Image: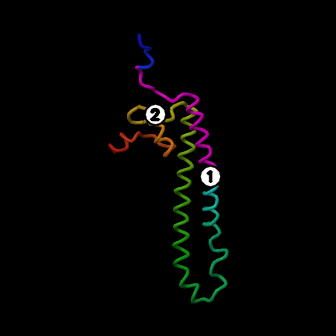
Amino acid sequence: MADNTENKEKVRYTDAELQEFKEMILEKLAKAKEEYAILKGNVDHSSSNDTEDTSPTFKVLEEGATSSAKEELGQLAARQYKFIQNLEAALVRIENKTYGICRETGKLIPKERLRLVPHATLSVEAKNKR
C-alpha cells in the first residue's frame, strides 16, 4: 500500500528549504543595500565634482544633463529601495513559514521562480491572469 503523504500536494516548504531561501535572500539583501548606498550617495553628492569650476557657458549647457542624470539616479535608487523592502518582506514570510505560497492560488511557487525572483508572492499562473 502506498504512503498517503506521497499523494498529498506539498502545502509549504520545509524548514530546511526555507533556511536555504533565507540565506539566498540575505545575500541578495546585503548586495542590494550596498548598491542602494552607492546610488543614494551619488544622488546626494552629484554636484560635488561637477561643472562648478568650468566656464559659465559650459555650466549652462551641462545643467540639463546633470539634472537628468540626477533624476535617473534618483529613480534607480527608488527602485532599489523597493527591491530591499520586498526582500525584507520575504524574510518575514520565511519566519511565518508562508514563504513561497502564492497569495492568489494558495499553491507553492516553484523553487526555480523563487530563485529568480526571491520576493515573488504570485505563481506564474496567477501573474499571467492579471
Q: Is residue 110 left or right of residue 21?
A: left
Q: Residue furthest left?
A: 129
Residue that appears at 63% across and 74% down: 47
Residue 20 position, x and y percent, is 59, 36
Q: Is residue 97 above or below residue 75?
A: above
Residue placed under numbered mark 2 in the picture: 101
Residue at left offset 34%, top offset 44%: 128
Label 1 SS: helix
Identified at 65% across, 69% down, the residue is 45
Q: Is mark 2 on a helix, strand or loop?
A: loop
Viewed as shown, does residue 23 lie left or right of 10?
right
Quarter of the N terminus within the rendering: top left
* Quarter residue 66 falls in: bottom right
Say whether residue 22 is magenta.
Answer: yes
> Which amino acid does the dot numbered 2 rest on?
Ile
The amino acid type found where label 1 is placed reads Lys
Residue 31, numbered label: 1
Q: Give the range drawn in magenta.
A: 7-31
